[in-house]
Image: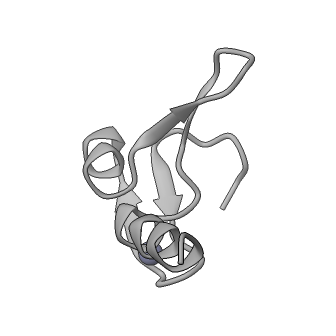
Amino acid sequence: MPYGSTDYAECPRCGKRALGQSEIEQLFGYRTMESGKIIPQSHCRECRSEEVRNSSR
Ligand SMILES: [Zn+2]
């Protein structure tokens, strides 16, 4: 996926895709860079929560 795109996201872990800002907000969520730029999370919410769970134990 083109880096910097704000209306498309694809999870490299499970392959889930989100098209459009509302889907991205729902499935991936956004993060704000230090520069103030807002980009989609690289991994979907499910995979992020699993990784947090796995790495915390
Ligand atoms: Zn995922």
What residue lies at 59% left-to-right and 74% top-to-bottom? 55
Q: In this view, does 10 lie to the left or right of 45?
A: right
Q: Position of residue 12 (x, y in %)?
A: 60, 76
What residue lies at 52% left-to-right and 64% top-to-bottom? 43
Q: In this view, does 23 lie to the left or right of 49?
A: left
Against 39, residue 50 (above or below) is below
Front-most of residues 46 and 15? 46
What residue lies at 65% left-to-right and 15% top-to-bottom? 36
Q: In which quarter of the image is ligand 1?
A: bottom left
Against 6, residue 16 (above or below) is below
Against 15, residue 39 (above or below) is above
Q: Residue furthest front?
A: 57
Q: Where is residue 54 in the image (x, y as percent from the top left)?
A: 51, 80
Front-most of residues 51 and 56? 56
Occupied quadrant, residue 21: top left
Front-most of residues 30 and 4? 30
Q: Where is residue 51 in the image (x, y as percent from the top left)?
A: 52, 73
Q: Residue furthest bottom?
A: 14
Against 32, residue 40 (above or below) is below
Q: Is residue 41 left or right of residue 1?
A: left
What residue lies at 52% left-to-right and 38% top-to-bottom? 6
Q: Where is residue 41 in the image (x, y as percent from the top left)?
A: 53, 50
Quarter that holds the N terminus: bottom right
Instruction: Tell me how the rendering is colored.
Output: one colour
Q: How many marks?
A: 0
Front-most of residues 56 and 18? 56
